[in-house]
Image (cartoon, rainbow, N blue to C red):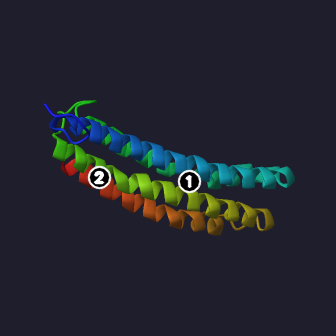
């Protein structure tokens, strides 16, 4: 049996690395984005504590990407023999790895930018508390790209 990352028995390892990256990258982006929103929320709440529920919703929006990455990881783990299914070949493991990358990378980037949009929307609420619908729409638009990446990853992992 050969040794190394590309030996025949390394399929499950590559798939696990993909699942870990989907979770780590998307989760890291969510943590950064939620943190940005939290800082903006804390500033607004010092002056307008009555806006707590609205700014909390805006702060939490970037957290969805971490959930998407975790979902892709669970589906992958179920398919590769960790939570059921069968252990993949090297080729299949590399395909699982590649299938996990869209939500990992897009989740990381979109969560950070959604955090920035959420922080700006929280600042908008501070000046115009009656514009919650508009404020919500701005960071929600960034979510579109995370959802597209989630669909690509889920459909690809499910088809392997």
> Above or below — where is 52 with respect to 106?
above
Residue at image location 58% in from the left, 63% down from the top: 139
**Who's the residue at 64% across and 52% down the image?**
59
- Which residue is label 2 attached to? 99
Left or right of residue 87: residue 149: right
Q: How many marks?
A: 2
Q: Quadrant of the N terminus?
A: top left
- Marks 2 and 1: which is nearer the front? 2
**Left or right of 64, for residue 73:** left
Residue 33: x percent and y percent?
60, 53
Residue 83 vs 65, above or below: the answer is above
Q: Position of residue 114 (x, y in %)?
A: 57, 60
**Of callouts 2 and 1, which one flags the residue occurring earlier in the amino acid sequence?**
1
Q: Secondary structure at mark 1?
A: helix
- Residue at 67%, 54% in the rendered image: 37
* Residue 62 circle label: 1
Separation of marks 2 and 1 at Cα, in angstroms: 22 Å
The spot of residue 138 in percent (x, y) is 59, 68
Viewer-side residue, 7 vs 89? 7
Query: Where residue 126 sits: x, y (%)?
Result: 78, 62
């Amino acid at each position: 049996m050969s040794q190394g990352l590309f030996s025949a028995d390394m399929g499950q390892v590559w798939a696990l690395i993909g699942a870990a990256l989907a979770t780590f990258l998307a989760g890291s982006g969510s943590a950064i984005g939620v943190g940005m929103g939290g800082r903006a929320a804390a500033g607004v709440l010092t002056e307008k504590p009555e806006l707590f529920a609205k700014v909390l919703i805006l702060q939490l929006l970037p957290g969805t990407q971490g959930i998407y990455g975790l979902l892709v990881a669970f589906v992958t783990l179920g398919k590769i023999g960790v939570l059921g299914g069968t252990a993949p070949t090297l080729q299949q493991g590399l395909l699982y790895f590649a299938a996990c990358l869209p939500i990992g990378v897009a989740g990381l980037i979109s969560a950070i930018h959604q955090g920035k949009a959420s922080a700006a929307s929280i600042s908008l609420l501070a000046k115009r508390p009656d514009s919650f619908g508009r404020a919500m729409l701005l960071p929600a638009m960034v979510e579109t790209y995370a959802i597209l990446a989630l669909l690509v990853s889920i459909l690809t992992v499910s088809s392997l």
